[in-house]
Amino acid sequence: MSRKGIVYTVFALVLALVVGTGMMALGEAGTYGGTLRCALASEPGTLDMQMTTGVAASIPARHILEGLFAFDATYTPQPMLAESWELSKDGTVATFHLRHGVLFQNGQEMTSADVLASLDRWGKYGLTSKALWSHVVKLSAPDAYTVVMQLDQPFAPMTTYLANIYGGPSIYPKAVVDKAGNQPIAPKDLIGTGPYKFVEWKSGDYMLLERFDNYVPVSTPASGFAGDKVAYFDKLQFFFVADNNARLVGIKSGTYDYVVNIPSDLYSTIKDNKSIIPILTNHPPIYPIMLINNKTGLLATNYTLKQAILAALDMTPIMQAGYGDKMFWRLDGSYFASGIRWYTKTGTQLYNQNDPTKAKQLMKEAGYNGEPINMIVAQDMTAQYNQALVVKYQLEQVGFKVDLQVYDKATFFARRNDVKNPQWQLAFSFYSTTPDPSLVLMLNPNYAGWWNSPKIQTLRNELNQITDFKARYAKWEEIMTLWYQQIPAIKFGDAYQLHLMRSDILGGYGTEARPPMVSPYFWNSWK
């Protein structure tokens, strides 16, 4: 079988498995039973999605938790726990009508009291709530199945925020929310309305979910994360397998049904294996990015010194180091990749300069005197670690003193997210495409990097108030112009992750008619 024939171009990025729309739409019934075994590249810190933006956490959590809205296959928010909703003419009062008879996994019916408590907690402590919640004047429940949100001004991406699982407003029972407060919900207390329920978490080994037999699906057709969900598998088991070769050997042997993030240089070992489907996630891709500490330290507001770093970088060897063969990456300075409606070339004339002379001149203008630049990276994020080595070399070639600090993934994220005492200037990671620019994490002033200059505050607020797409796109171009002026982060390019699936997993996955989403889910799929 040719490489073209077995490598699917799919609408996904980090962890692309979705068999959600499945063969049921074609009139073919699924088969109940068995266990789906998925090997993750890392272990989540928590499954409380109000408190984390972690991709690894979102994969099992999507099966347990639901929100008022969910993204369909086009990343359009659709009602999920909400049956319907309406917005007042002035755009300041949103009324959500809840579905009747929806059950939590403890058997309790979901009512407006649970939704109010969950939204209130998210508004106070959620990682992605602040942009919306800063405009919430009042939240009320006229009856057991109605929730009213009153705003001080229109907020254009409101339903996008409510559909977002990453740091987003998952709905829990009120008792669970009251007990947790501002602390992550313990796994044993993790109760949602999804098609699978939490059973066990063996640290360092695996997490086990099992079918929630009393799940109450929405009546609309399955599409992406939205619509009807059928739990065909009895159980879902997520293994934590950091070693790349171990994940590869596991799927070859049939130990795992799906594995994530296989290094691109291992593609040749499976490209002719008919029992395995390689999946290249290139539309949209992921974005390897170097965050900059905009809050404290040497680079915080020294925009000239940031410009010197940007001028010094040659993106081609950086992307080669991270992702190998050119089939797995492309150069692109726009935050959103080509083909996405938010794509723009605005500001990108400063991308991939590879100009050591300019970099040295800017370093002089910025008053740089050989102070160490602290760079942090996780060694078990292979692509990012390899990119950090090249960036270190390139910066040292123009005269920067670089202190590269290498950690395991858990320690890296703990240090990167330490807002009280951040001891780094540059941090390496990668990001997925969001459905709306307002959800770009670097625009969140509370996200690591903490970009919150007066100008971005203004542009961010204006972006969220505008409802017309053309006007919002123009505002996004203004933000990209400022991005390349103040440099809150540096994007290296677009990268395509390689994931592997056993060919006996059915449900229509990987076809153009039923494209995968931003992360995998296993309802509406079977063996």
Image: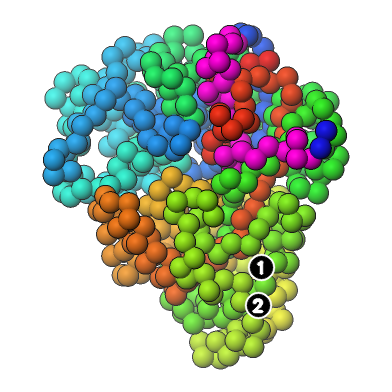
Instruction: Residue at 58%, 90% (x, y): give it.
Output: 361
Residue 92 is situated, as x and y percent measured from the top left of the image, at 16, 43
Query: Relative to the observer, which residue lies in front, 464 or 421?
Result: 464
Q: Quadrant of the N terminus?
A: top right
Question: Quarter of the image holding residue 200?
Answer: top right
Residue 21 included in the magenta stretch of the image? yes
Kindly indicate whether the residue at mark 1 contacts the one at mark 2 (C-beta within 8 angstroms). Answer: yes
Residue 481 included in the magenta stretch of the image? no
Mark 2 is surrounded, within 10 Å at the Cα level, by few (under 14), some (14 to 19) or many (20 or more) other residues, namely some
Question: Which segment is the magenta one?
Answer: 3-30
Residue 294 is situated, as x and y percent measured from the top left of the image, at 45, 68
Report the residue marked by disc 1: 315
Q: Secondary structure at mark 2?
A: loop
Q: Is residue 401 visible?
A: no
Q: Which mark is residue 354?
A: 2
Q: Which mark is residue 296?
A: none
Q: Amino acid at mark 2?
A: Asn
Q: Secondary structure at mark 1?
A: helix
Q: Quadrant of the C terminus?
A: top right
Q: Amino acid at mark 1?
A: Met
Instruction: Residue at 73%, 67% (x, y): give it.
Output: 317
Q: Is residue 385 above or below residue 396?
A: above
Mark 1 is surrounded, within 10 Å at the Cα level, by few (under 14), some (14 to 19) or many (20 or more) other residues, namely many
Query: Relative to the observer, which residue lies in front, 327 or 396?
Result: 327
Here the colouring is rainbow
> Is 124 on the left-hand or right-hand side of 212?
left
> Is 8 on the left-hand or right-hand side of 244?
left
Going from N to C along the chain, the mark reached first, 2 or 1, is 1
Instruction: Residue at 53%, 43% (x, y): give it.
Output: 54
